[in-house]
Image: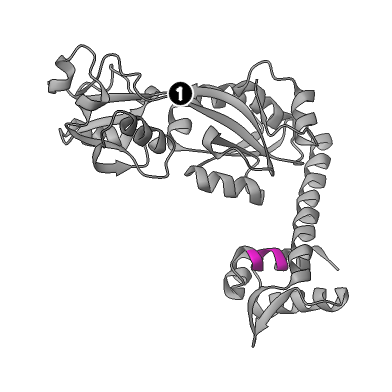
Amino acid sequence: MNFQQLRSVREAIRHDFNLTETAEVLHASQSAVSRQIRELEDELGIEIFHRYGKRLTGLTTPGREIAGIIERILKDRESLKKASEQYRGFDHGSLSVAATHAQIRYRLPDVVLGFRERFPQVSLSLQQCAPGQILELLRGGSVELGFLPSGLTGNAELVQFEAYRWSHRIVAPVGHPLLALEAPGLVDIARYPVITFEEGMVGRARINEAFRAQGVEPNVIISAVDSDVIKTYVELGLGVGIIAERAYNPAVDRKIAMLEGTDLIPPITTNIAVRRGAYLRDYAVAFIQSVVPGLGAQRIHDRIHGGPAELIAA
């Protein structure tokens, strides 16, 4: 039994039993991947996969249990490598973080700047993606830290720490009739075309719920994945925009203005998440602490390695 055999099984499962894609990911031939899987099955004395001819079609009953064990072994192997790296060099290595565009663009610059000043030898990878993708990257071990909205809690594989709360802001082209109102509400806003986040993006469900609570539906004519794109089309006069609060800068966004008294949509809590049982280098712990000040390193380690609570408040 070797790690290459285990990786062949894991990647075959991750790629929906497609051996061509599995071989590409492993930089091997399809026949080599098939051989690795067969050799492991022969050694274990069981079939991990159902087959139709030469094609894999699914996991057998024992294969489902074996798949879970293989995943744990490979993740523990990564933890062993990181543990050894920790003692070879505290301030050298890499850290991968997944977050949405708004977080990377508006929330994390100061955090990243401070981190780079403290750990200049650490390579930091920022992966911009949607919440569902962040969740999958964390589960698969492709990233070490991920920023998730509170609505995605409830995953036993992750430990989450409350990071911060943020709100939406409503913007309109300069001269828009809504800007003349003292305290426009969602009913007033619903009379005009709306430009906001795509369904499935952070906050869109909260936006929809807020309008429905007022008995109206927003007329969303354009949806996008980030606030900068939304602002672009608001500047063109196509509609009223609903964006992340930090995305509006009056010194820069001169063609649009923010409506007064627009705390109309309940705020959202963002958590920083890590896979339960993962080994974090000291600089990864420091990154969490820079986002959640006052959170002790020992508390972080205790929760990741067996703490019962899934969501940890700062």
Q: Which secondary structure, mark 1? A: strand
Magenta stretch in the rendered image:
9-13
Quadrant where the image shows the C terminus: top right
Say above or below: 33 vs 85. below
Q: Nearer the viewer, residue 245 or 122?
A: 245
The residue singled out by tag 1 in the image is: 166
What residue is rendered at 36% in x and 33% in y? 207
What residue is rendered at 44% in x and 37% in y? 202
Q: Is residue 86 left or right of residue 25?
A: right
Q: How many marks?
A: 1
Quarter where residue 68 is shown = bottom right
- Can residue 26 be seen from the camera position used here? no
What residue is rendered at 78% in x and 53% in y? 72
| Percent x, y of residue 215 | 28, 32
Q: Nearer the viewer, residue 95 or 241?
A: 241
Q: Is residue 10 magenta?
A: yes
Give the class, few, some or many, for how many residues have Cα within 10 Å of label 1's Cα (few <14, many ≥20): some
Quadrant where the image shows the N terminus: bottom right
| Percent x, y of residue 22 | 62, 69
Give the amino acid at mark 1. Trp
| Percent x, y of residue 47 | 78, 77
- Can residue 289 be seen from the camera position used here? yes
